[in-house]
Image (cartoon, helix red, strand yellow):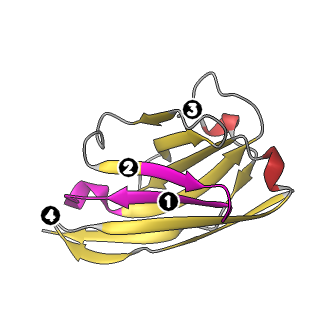
Amino acid sequence: QVRLVESGGGSVQAGGSLRLSCVASGNTDSAYLMGWFRQSPGKEREGVASTYTHGGSTSYADSVKGRFTISHDNALNTVFLQMNNLKPEDTGMYYCAAGTLPAGAWWDRLEYAYWGQGTHVTVSS
């Protein structure tokens, strides 16, 4: 089992920045793939970014490329999502997720076995 706890959400104006954190505990050695997802009211949960905890390969949704950066610190069992130049459409609940196997489709929720409770981000225009 892997427990994930997100933090760092809040309210910012368009153009601002936030840094989300996700701390993993439990059987963290099994958390091979880490991802950030978001969900807005009335929309499906979508993949934002992912990284492998060993090797560091990263992937991003087209909508956030060049603005968001995912990183991880294995010593702290923490994954970060640095979000710059935020836009109102980035508003939503952001979830951290952990997968135990290499992902064929990192953006697919089914690739992830463990989920956090989420942290909310509001971007005002």
Circles 1 and 2 in contact, beta carbons < 8 Å: yes
The number of callouts visible is 4
Instruction: Evaluate whether residue 9 shows in this view.
Output: yes
Q: Disc 3 or 2, which lies upstream in sequence?
A: 2
Residue annotated with mark 4: 15
Residue annotated with mark 1: 80
10 Å crowding of disc 4: few (<14), some (14-19), many (20+)? some
CA–CA distance in space, label 3 to label 2: 15 Å
Residue annotated with mark 3: 106
Asked which secondary structure carries label 3, the reply is loop
Question: In the figure, residue 24 lies in which quadrant?
Answer: bottom right
Q: Is residue 69 above or below residue 116?
A: above
Q: Nearer the viewer, mark 2 or mark 4?
A: 2
Asked which secondary structure carries label 2, the reply is strand
Q: Disc 1 or 2, which lies upstream in sequence?
A: 2
Circles 1 and 4 in contact, beta carbons < 8 Å: no
Q: Which residues are magenta?
A: 70-91
The residue shown at (37%, 59%) is: 82
Q: Is residue 33 left or right of residue 88?
A: right
Q: Nearer the viewer, mark 3 or mark 2?
A: 2
Q: Disc 4 or 3, which lies upstream in sequence?
A: 4
Q: Is residue 13 left or right of residue 37?
A: left
The residue shown at (46%, 43%) is: 49
10 Å crowding of disc 1: few (<14), some (14-19), many (20+)? many
Q: Is residue 89 above or below residue 101?
A: below
Residue 87 among those drawn in magenta: yes
